[in-house]
Image: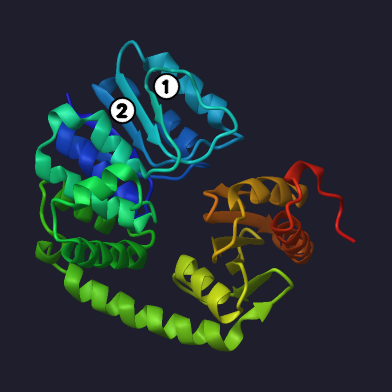
């Protein structure tokens, strides 16, 4: 029998999926998201697999309990591993749920399957940590002592640019994951160097575009419809808007919503907490990490959402507790 891997489509997701595949061998790999995970699980006959591994996919507040029930229903027939590092209001108690905040999913995945992995596979976990801004953990730092750090950041940079450029091209991400799982260097995987060059040129265009078009509220800076690399555009929005939080928003015509990517810039703000509250107030959803998060809000509520978010960020920077924030004036 083969195994089944669900992974998030970012750098940490690709790397943690590669580590899992390196450990368990032959596996079908799917990329999905928190809001789509339950639908994916329901559409697949899980009992035909001997292992089901889920890596780097946050537990969705709306469908999380359904995911939990689904996995518990096959637990006696299938080995289940749910590995994640995103904040939760309350972690699950199941023995198949491996959850720890403050480190990346790649690091957790390596630790879960350590007995089945060779020493060199730690390098893939380091790539995932760098790509997810989680390379300062004690374990990752200790592993880095066994490599040339400059090479690690070079390899991780190539990998990150490719994963971002790939977007929803999941076949290409699967190709990268498969190559990493057999410990191929990013420089040796066909096409990655050229793709990284293309992505870097596109990033420079985006940086220049953000510089010209950035808008500033009191406590955040944002750009709309930059068309590409939302996470990077959010970083540059904070920089050129000289704001503690940067946002890149893109309008989805068919769904009549705005998707947003947010990044902090030297500010002690919990984006995950503030988005879970403010986005919900405006008919949307949001969350992620304290320093990097995403949200989706209806188009009709976008302006009001941004105003309340700006207010909430300012209040939190002054020490206000999120749950006790008064309504914005």
Residue 284 at least partly seen: no
Front residue of this view, candidates 266 and 271: 266
For the point 39% across and 78% down, the residue is: 203
Q: As displayed, is residue 212 above or below residue 266?
A: below
User: How much space separates mark 2 and mark 1, taking CA atoms?
Assistant: 9 Å
Image location (x, y in percent) of residue 251: 61, 67
Identify the element where label 2 is drawn: strand
Q: Which residue is mark 2?
A: 52
Point out the image quarter for the C terminus. Answer: bottom right
Query: Toward which corner of the image does residue 181 lie, by quadrant?
Result: top left
Circle 1 is placed at which residue position?
71
Quarter holding the N terminus?
top left
Q: Is residue 85 visible?
A: yes
Task: Indicate how the structure is coloured in the image.
Answer: rainbow
Task: Label 1: state its secondary structure.
Answer: helix
Question: Residue at the right extreme?
Answer: 329
- The relative height of residue 234 versus residue 44 in the rendered view (above or below) is below
- Along the horizontal axis of the image, is 22 left or right of 158? left
User: Which residue is pictured at 42% across the width and 21% down the height?
Assistant: 71
Give whichever of 148, 90 is nearer the camera: 148
The residue under the point 22% across, 44% down is: 18
In the visual, does 311 lie left or right of 242? right
CB under 8 Å between callouts 2 and 1? yes
Q: How many marks?
A: 2
Q: Position of residue 37 (x, y in %)?
A: 46, 37
Percent coordinates x, y for residue 127 in the rendering: 25, 54
> Percent x, y for residue 192?
19, 68
């Amino acid at each position: 029998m083969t195994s089944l891997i669900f992974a998030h489509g970012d750098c940490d997701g690709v790397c943690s999926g590669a580590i899992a595949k390196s450990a368990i061998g032959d596996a079908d790999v799917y990329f999905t998201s928190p809001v789509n995970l339950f639908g994916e699980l329901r559409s697949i006959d899980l009992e035909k697999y001997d292992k089901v591994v889920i890596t780097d996919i946050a537990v969705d507040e709306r469908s999380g309990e359904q995911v939990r029930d689904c996995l518990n229903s096959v637990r006696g027939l299938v080995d289940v591993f749910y590995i994640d590092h995103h904040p939760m209001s309350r972690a699950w108690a199941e023995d198949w749920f491996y959850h720890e905040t403050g480190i990346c999913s790649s690091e957790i995945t390596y630790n879960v399957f350590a007995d089945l992995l060779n020493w060199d596979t730690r390098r893939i976990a380091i790539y995932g940590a760098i790509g997810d801004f989680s390379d300062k953990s004690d374990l990752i730092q200790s592993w880095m002592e066994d490599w040339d750090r400059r090479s690690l950041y070079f390899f991780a940079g190539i990998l990150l640019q490719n994963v971002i450029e790939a977007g929803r091209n999941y076949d290409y991400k699967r190709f990268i994951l498969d190559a990493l799982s057999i410990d191929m260097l990013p420089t040796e995987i066909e096409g990655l160097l050229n793709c990284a060059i293309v992505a870097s040129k596109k990033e420079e265009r985006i940086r220049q575009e953000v510089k010209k078009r950035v808008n500033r509220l009191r406590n955040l800076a944002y750009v709309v419809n930059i068309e590409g690399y939302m996470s990077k555009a959010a970083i540059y929005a904070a920089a050129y808007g000289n704001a503690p939080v940067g946002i890149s928003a893109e309008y989805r015509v068919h769904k009549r919503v705005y998707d947003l990517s947010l990044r902090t810039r030297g500010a002690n703000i919990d984006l995950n907490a503030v988005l879970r509250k403010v986005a919900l107030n405006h008919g949307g959803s949001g969350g992620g990490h304290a320093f990097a998060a995403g949200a989706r809000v209806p188009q009709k509520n976008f302006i009001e959402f941004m105003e309340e978010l700006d207010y909430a960020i300012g209040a939190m920077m002054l020490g206000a507790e999120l749950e006790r924030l008064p309504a914005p004036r």
